[in-house]
Amino acid sequence: MKALVAQSYGPLEDLVVTEMPKPVPGPGQILVRTEASAVNAADAVLVTGVMKDVLPVQHPFTPGVDISGIVEAVGEGVTRFVVGDPVLAWLGLPSGALAEYVLVEDAPSVAIRPVGLDAAHAAALATGGLTASSLVNAAKVTEGETVLVIGAAGGVGSYVVQLAKQAGATVLATGRAEDAAYLKRLAADEVLDYKSVNIPEETRRRVPGGVDVVIDVAHVSPDLAEAAVAVKSGGRVIYVLGGPPPALDRGVSATYAGAEAPEGRLGELAAQAADGRLRVEVSANYPFASARQALVDFTTQHVRGKITVTF
């Protein structure tokens, strides 16, 4: 089979499409024939080795944590899936989805792809949707609250906006001026152009006293406490990256959250995407032969929603 492979740590430009052995599912595994994958920030981090002391990988290494495809074979003990089932999955780390065939553990992080959700949009849902759901749940967003989403136009933020709105919140979303109409379509109540205003100050101007919750997907400031300026006393700040939460004043709490796949969550997100309750934005799609370019463009361009790769 063909796979996108890094032979060692290095720039994304060194990735190559090459032949690799076709895997065989073991107990509790399914083999998926890939129809689509999606590009994530983790792919670049793992390929380049920026965080190799924390997240080392073995080479040759195939990136990609999101997959949508067809079950090709099932291992011993697998009863939820049969050959021919359309599925979507979040692989977690290490990854491997940018290959023609991928081993997937039979776990809550894999679900049947419903009718009405095509392969590319299913792949674009897995990591982003699961991460956003975890962030909104960690924030304990309730009806009537105000939520500021920092990094709202991207592959996680776009889902955070929608899920926070589903929870009954008034949503302020940050983006570029050209993202305003898109963010409004996602159900943002107000859009803040981070290129032209100071986000905490502008938030305070629009919501005197501060918002109830900030969900910071972007971490655009090296000072993680800066986002807390936009929150009212006793409010909450949720960050998407790991690490020790910053010490905040005024009774503001800080929490980290990331992608999690409790039982049934991925299937529910897929059902919402299939029937239109959850919008999945695919800003660009690349053929597998151009998968390396997809990763390069993801890291060098302003991406709205997700970039996908189809096989």
Image (tube, helix red, strand yellow):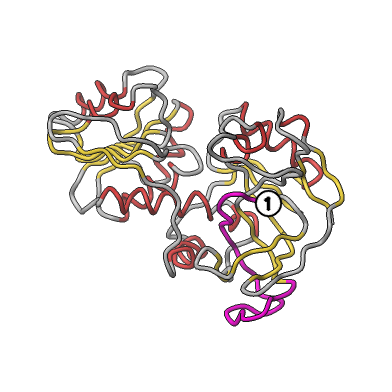
Q: Is residue 110 left or right of residue 241?
A: right
The local secondary structure at tag 1 comes to loop
Q: Main secondary structure of the magenta part?
A: loop
Residue found at x 44% / y 66%:
268
| Picture quadrant where residue 285 is located | top right
**Residue 79 image point, x, y percent:** 59, 82
Residue sitting at the far front:
53
Q: Residue at x 64, y 54 (%)?
A: 120
Within 10 Å of the Cα at label 1, are there few (<14), some (14-19), or many (20+) other Cα atoms? many
- What's drawn in magenta, residue-wise? 72-97
Query: Would you say residue 92 sits in the magenta stretch?
Result: yes
Name the residue located 31 percent from the left edge and 54 percent from the top edge.
137
171 or 299: nearer the eye? 299
Q: Residue at x 43, y 69 (%)?
A: 263
User: Is residue 80 left or right of 99 when viewed as pictured?
Assistant: left
**Residue 241 falls left or right of residue 293:** left
Question: In which quarter of the view is residue 80 placed?
Answer: bottom right
Determine which residue is flagged by label 1. Answer: 96
Q: Where residue 7 sits: x, y (%)? A: 78, 38
The N terminus lies in quadrant: bottom right
Amino acid type of disc 1? Answer: Gly
- Is residue 198 located in the magenta-colored stretch of the structure? no
Q: Which x, y percent locates residue 223?
A: 34, 22
Q: Quadrant of residue 83?
A: bottom right
Q: The C terminus appears in which quarter of the rendering?
A: bottom right
